[in-house]
Amino acid sequence: MPISRRQLLKTATLAGVLGAAPALARAQVTAPEKPELTIAVGGQSLIYYLPLSVAHLKGYFKEVGLNARIADFAGGSKALQAVVGGSADVVSGAFEHTISLQTKGQFYRSFVLQGRAPMIVLAVSKKTLPGYKTPADLKGKKIGVTAPGSSTNMMVSFFLAQHGLKPSDVSYIGVGAGAGAVTAIRSGQVDVIANLDPVISTLVKDDAITIIADTRTLKDSRQIFGGEMPAGCLYASQAFIDANPNTTQALANALVRADHWIQQATPDDIAKLVPASYLLGDPELYKLALKGNREALSPDGMVPEGGPQTALNALADYVPHFDRTKVDISRVWTNQFAIKANEKYPHG
């Protein structure tokens, strides 16, 4: 019996639905378990956190099914407190915080990288410390960090320890990561500053500081820390990752796309994308800062081999009474999500 056009269309439609069923099932399986979430960050306007901003501004979070709210704090330690306290789900922060947390019995894991060098610069004020000659001159001085306990604080303490000084030999003052940090040096509120771009480039242009340690390049970072030093990343509690593997993968997908886009974009492209407040009133200076930090930004979201051990060594060197026996370094990071993200988005 010949098949009518109506029957043919009905059969074709049914076949299409059946054929799509596995794909629909896969979509349901891989849909984020927690599409509404909060990411805490300490100083979003910093180039250190540029991949997070790009993922948000380019709509990559929405494209993977996430409505990600970004809560911006004065420094990374404040962002960490937000996730530990339960007001945020994920942190965009410094890799070494995952190690510090484990020493306190709290298990957090980095799952996608934003930076492969800390990008932190330590500099002295030409106004209040014009005669600086050696690190010994820092004793008794006020040092501005983004927030006490943040990665900028860690970098200073590590630098001091390398030169025979203790954290108690100086005073740490939280100055944030934007215009307030610039003002702190200009006004003489602090004698020394540990910060990132565009803050540092702004102060260099003002001829307000003398740089004494710089981790914006891989070469200098390796020299200071003795190896690869993973920096900005997304990290979350192991409990969150275990309960939300699809959400974690979606976050990694968005960040890896952002990492790729930054590598392909020009400084003009990036300056046009970010909010005007990121530029600190000088777009050309911001673009120069982008060029100076590009090498330190991760090209693929992958934690470099040996990087976690370098971070552990740095913490052990500067944290008093640090107990290495409490740290299982394999539990503070994973590349499994970044690997899958790069397979899915090989070209961004």
Image (tube, helix red, strand yellow):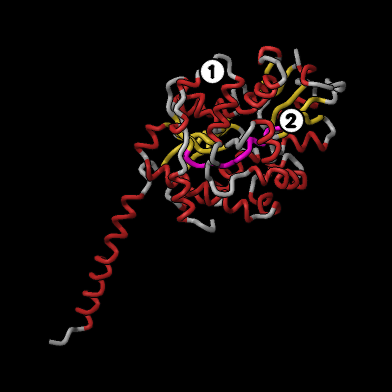
Residue designated by label 1: 322
| Residue 112 included in the magenta stretch of the image | yes
Label 1 crowd (10 A; few <14 / some 14-19 / many >=20): some
Closer to the camera in the image, 101 or 63 = 101
Residue 193 placed where, x, y %?
A: 73, 26
In space, the residues marked 2 and 1 are separated at their CA atoms by 24 Å
Closer to the camera in the image, 246 or 57 = 246
Looking at the rendered structure, the secondary structure element under dot 2 is strand
Of the two numbered discs 2 and 1 in the rendering, the one whose residue sits closer to the viewer? 1
Disc nearer the start of the sequence (2/1): 2
Label 2 crowd (10 A; few <14 / some 14-19 / many >=20): some
| Residue 283 included in the magenta stretch of the image | no
- Say whether residue 283 is left or right of residue 27: right
Quadrant of the snapshot with the N terminus: bottom left
- Residue 196 showing in the rendered view: no
Point 21% across, 74% down: residue: 11
Q: Quadrant of residue 168?
A: top right
Numbered circle sitting on residue 72: none
Q: Amino acid at mark 1?
A: Phe
Point 54% across, 27% down: residue: 312
Residues rendered magenta in the picture: 111-122
On screen, residue 177 above or below 268: above
Residue designated by label 2: 213
Residue 109 placed where, x, y %?
A: 45, 34
Looking at the rendered structure, the secondary structure element under dot 1 is loop
Labels 2 and 1 touching (C-beta < 8 A): no
Q: Amino acid at mark 2?
A: Ala
